[in-house]
Each structure stands twice: as C-alpha cells, then as structure tokens.
Image: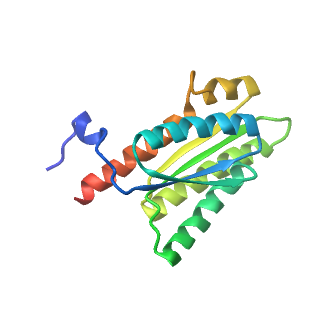
Amino acid sequence: MVTTSRESALPGDEPLGDARVLIIEGRYYEALSDELLKGARAVLEAAGVEVEVITVPGALEIPIAAEIALDAAEITGTDVDAVVALGVVIRGETYHFEIVAGESARGLMDLGVTHALPVGNGILTVDTEAQAWERARVSEGDKGGGAARAALSLLRLRRRLEA
C-alpha cells in the first residue's frame, strides 16, 4: 500500500543510533566555510551521530573526496551513513562559476543515486559574498544546518524503509 501522508514522506527525529556522517567541506572561502561547518556540526551533534570532517580546497573537489572516502570505508569495513557537502561558489566574471556550481551538484547527485546514500548539499552558489553570508550565517539562512538536516532526513527515511 502506498501512502502519501506528510508524516510518511518526511521522517521526524527518530534516533539514529550509531550513524556516521561525513562532512566534506571546500575551504576556498574560509570564513564562510567555518560558518557553514558550525551550522552542520550543531545539527549533527544534536542528533547524536558520529561526525568526521574532511577538508578539500574547493567545491569541485567535494564529490571526488566523497567517492574516495566511500571507497576507503568499504576497504576498512567502516560505514558512512550519510554525507554533508559544504562549500561556497561565488559568481565571477568568467564561465568558471557555471562549471563549478553545476558539476559539484551533478557529482553529489550521482554519488547519492549511485550509492543510495543520503547526501545533504550545502554548497552555496551565489552572485555575491553578501548573499553567501546571508545563507551561511547560523543566525540567518543556516544552510550548513539545512544540509545536515536534509542528510539526516534521508537517512531516517532509508532506515525506516529498510526495517
């Protein structure tokens, strides 16, 4: 039987037990990255999950680092239950913005679909640094926390459906 209730579609705050969540952060804009990480960590720690942070130079490296981490986890027998991607891409005067924004998003989508892995995309793609700060600040947009909540929601959904 298929249900369409909101409760079924959006899992709540069920405990996640021994879940391990990997945060991969692009550090190209360090101060903004710190704020995104602060928001994501707060949400994940409140959920009681184990958190590991991997740092890469920028947003384009995030999906690659996630794939490397998943391969390493498989080799070592360590679980990665979800990934939270954090980074900032600010439009410049060249086409590079479109490449980095589009390819990092595509890479994360491919990662999630290929591995049936909960992924929270907290890579900001904005026109100005001011827009980035509005979205990154925990007291305003809290997109780091939002990406963590999205990953946890998908993880809860997967666990509920697998039960």
Number of marks drawn: 0
Q: Position of residue 60 (x, y in %)?
A: 70, 53
Q: Position of residue 53 (x, y in %)?
A: 60, 53
Q: Is residue 13 left or right of residue 1?
A: right
Residue occupying image coordinates x 73% and y 43%? 98
Of 135 and 1, nearer the camera is 135
Give the colour scheme of this rendering: rainbow
Of 43 and 148, nearer the camera is 43
Q: Is residue 101 left or right of residue 14?
A: right
Q: Which residue is situated farthest in the bottom direction here?
A: 75
Q: Quadrant of the C terminus?
A: bottom left
Residue occupying image coordinates x 30% and y 38%? 12
User: Could you tell me if residue 155 is visible in this image?
Assistant: yes
Q: Which residue is situated farthest in the right direction here?
A: 93
Q: Is residue 63 left or right of residue 117?
A: right
User: Could you tell me if residue 128 is visible in this image?
Assistant: no
Q: Position of residue 112 (x, y in %)?
A: 48, 57
Of 80 and 131, nearer the camera is 80
**Where 76 sits versus 120, above or below?**
below
Q: Quadrant of residue 129?
A: top right
Q: Position of residue 62 (x, y in %)?
A: 65, 54
Of 92 and 64, nearer the camera is 64
Q: Quadrant of residue 110?
A: bottom right
Residue occupying image coordinates x 56% and y 33%? 143
Q: Is residue 19 left or right of residue 63?
A: left
